[in-house]
Amino acid sequence: MPQQSRYSDEHVEQLLSELAQVLEKHQTPTDLSLMVLGNMVTNLINTSVSSAQRQAIARSFAQALQSSIHEDSKY
């Protein structure tokens, strides 16, 4: 069953587009993009999530990331 989000698709797409534009503006290679985005996620978790919940949030994020990866070359 799909998970309901409290955020609109439009808002999510707008943020995603703006973040992608910044990376494109700087002609950021994939490995650096992943490093920067990973550091951003780490910073968000460390500064916005209680220490008691950080490991669970990181695990949940990693599982969601893995489940969203496609093995075909569709993208």
Image (cartoon, helix red, strand yellow):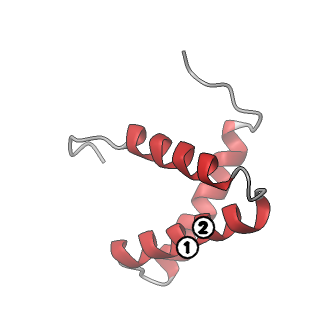
Q: Residue at x 51, y 75 (%)?
A: 36
- Residue 51 drawn at (x, y percent): 74, 59
Residue 73: % across, % down: 21, 46
Residue drawn 73% across and 37% down? 8
Q: Are the residues tagged 2 and 1 within 8 Å (C-beta)?
A: yes
Quarter of the figure that contains the N terminus: top right
Q: Is residue 69 left or right of residue 13?
A: left
Residue 73 as seen in the image, left or right of residue 52? left
Q: Is residue 26 above or below residue 47?
A: below
Position of residue 19 in the picture relative to residue 38 (left or right) = right
- Along the viewing direction, whichever of 63 and 18 lies nearer the viewer: 63
Classed neighbour count for the residue bearing mark 2: other residues with Cα under 10 Å, few (<14), some (14–19), many (≥20):
some
* Image location of residue 63, percent across then percent down: 46, 42
What residue is at 55 percent from the left and 42 percent from the top?
A: 60
Quarter assignment of residue 41: bottom right
Q: Which residue is mark 1?
A: 39
Tell me if residue 55 comes above or below residue 64 in the rendering.
Answer: below
- Residue assigned mark 2: 42
In the displayed image of the protein, which residue is found farthest to the bottom? 26
Looking at the image, the residue that sits furthest to the front is 52
- Does 11 appear above or below 35? above
